[in-house]
Image (tube, rainbow, N blue to C red):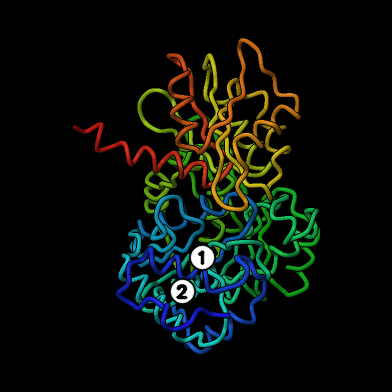
Amino acid sequence: MPSSSASRPDAHSPLAQWLAYLESIHSRPIDMGLGRVREVAARLELDLDAVKIVVGGTNGKGSTCAMLEAMLLSAGYKVGLYTSPHLLDFNERARVNGESASDAALTGQFAAVDAARGDTSLTYFELTTLAILRLFAQSALDVVILEVGLGGRLDAVNIVDADCAIVTSVDLDHVEWLGDDREKIGWEKAHIYRPGKPAICADPMPPQSLVDYAESIGADLWRFGRDYNYAGDKQQWNYGGRSQRRNAMAYPALRGANQLLNASAALAALEALRDRLPVPQQAVRLGLLQVQLPGRFQILPGQPAVILDVAHNPHAAAVLADNLDNMGFYPYTYAVFGMLNDKDVDGVIAKLGDRVDHWYCAGLPGPRGLSGEELAARLRARGVKEDKDSSIHACADPAAAYAAARESMGEGDRILVFGSFLTVAGVLASMRAARPARAD
């Protein structure tokens, strides 16, 4: 049941107070289903008068959303972008015309949705999703880009009928909610597709369940390798779609071998929508050059080499392993490694175990967070070596693990921070806290 009205913040209450309240008003943090959220959306008379692009998938969602936003902004459109989770500040989840929403804009919308829900209980994700959709509806936007939180079929974002939907990849994650094989997960994710609307699939080997579902509802399925593709050399790359080519493009500013797959999916969506959202070639080039997304194979400037990656499942870890291999030689790799207990920890270790020499296992907060000691035990159980050139350490949190790794590393070594959004966020927060001290 919701908390009493006496404990409710108001539109002028601090954002932190609102977020704490929203975490307290529903009995479960995840409660799949669209009935409650649709009911409150109807009370709010929520209507997004903009082109709507919905992006789902196991990995690559955030990168694809960021590239779409950058290209559309470069083309002069008014753009709303909703992503989750955030790294440092909740405001990152809602961007209007390239800027994070202000605290006041968010708390005003939280108050409106909280009032409209009455006795209907909403999860933190459901209420914040409705609030951000309402913010977008009131912002006179040309296009909104909405990242699916979990799965697709029963995710709160799926109350929106997409004008174009993208599934970036299908692999094992959230198996307790979505199923334990790619066919079950693909079926869940395919439910963001809509009859008669462009349905982009960037997975080179999509589950048959996804293809069958798209065909059964009459979606216009665009498959990578059949309806669109890319090719590249060391200097530039080209996109080829059903009837549009984009040639001689610089590589996206986001690093990693998989980013051309994400970029080509974004360009397929723009091709499918070009009658409503024409995007000139110069805007595509500029957008891909300027796109930024923290925590996706992000290499921080300066020395030592520090790589931040939110990879938290085996599919993402395999991509990360390839990207590390392409970086050149480093004597030793130090990993700040933290994971949640509902993830495939052993599968992630299997993909990266031989890429790391020294492990600094970081405890993560909350009931889902593994302690440093538990994570270290999982590494040892997997047979990860400990000798004169390799080690495993248990640390209280990501900040402590990062500090210990920095203390131990030698000149020319690199640090990899990965395993969860919380791991990367913990290290970034410690860096932000340290910045004023370094400036003095």
Relative to 304, is 285 above or below? below
x and y percentages locating residue 6 in the rendered image: 41, 82
Does the CB distance between marks 2 and 1 fall below 8 Å?
yes
Q: Which of 356/160 is in front?
A: 356
Around disc 2, counting alpha carbons within 10 Å, would you say few (fewer than 14), some (14 to 19), or many (20 or more)? Answer: many
Q: Quick check: can you spot residue 231?
A: no
Determine the CA span between mark 2 and mark 1.
9 Å
Which residue lies at the image location 49% right of the left edge and 75% below the top edge?
130
x and y percentages locating residue 364 in the rendered image: 55, 44
Q: Amino acid at mark 2?
A: Leu
Which quarter shows the N terminus?
bottom right
- Give the secondary structure at mark 2: helix
Question: In the visual, does 407 lie left or right of 173?
Answer: left
Which residue lies at the image location 49% right of the left edge and 41% below the top edge?
424
Q: Which residue is mark 1?
A: 146
Which residue lies at the image location 69% right of the left edge and 31% below the top edge?
377
Q: Quick check: can you spot residue 118?
A: yes
Q: Name the quadrant containing residue 259.
A: top right
Q: Between disc 2 and disc 1, whose residue precedes?
A: 2
Q: Which mark is residue 133?
A: 2
Around disc 1, counting alpha carbons within 10 Å, would you say few (fewer than 14), some (14 to 19), or many (20 or more)? Answer: many
Relative to 248, is 48 above or below? below
Q: Which of 333/143 is in front?
A: 333
Which residue is outermost to the left?
Answer: 440
- Give the secondary structure at mark 1: strand
> Which of labels 2 and 1 is toward the front?
2
Which residue is outermost to the top?
Answer: 388
x and y percentages locating residue 151 in the rendered image: 66, 62
Relative to 282, is 433 above or below? above
Q: Which of 62/338 is in front?
A: 338
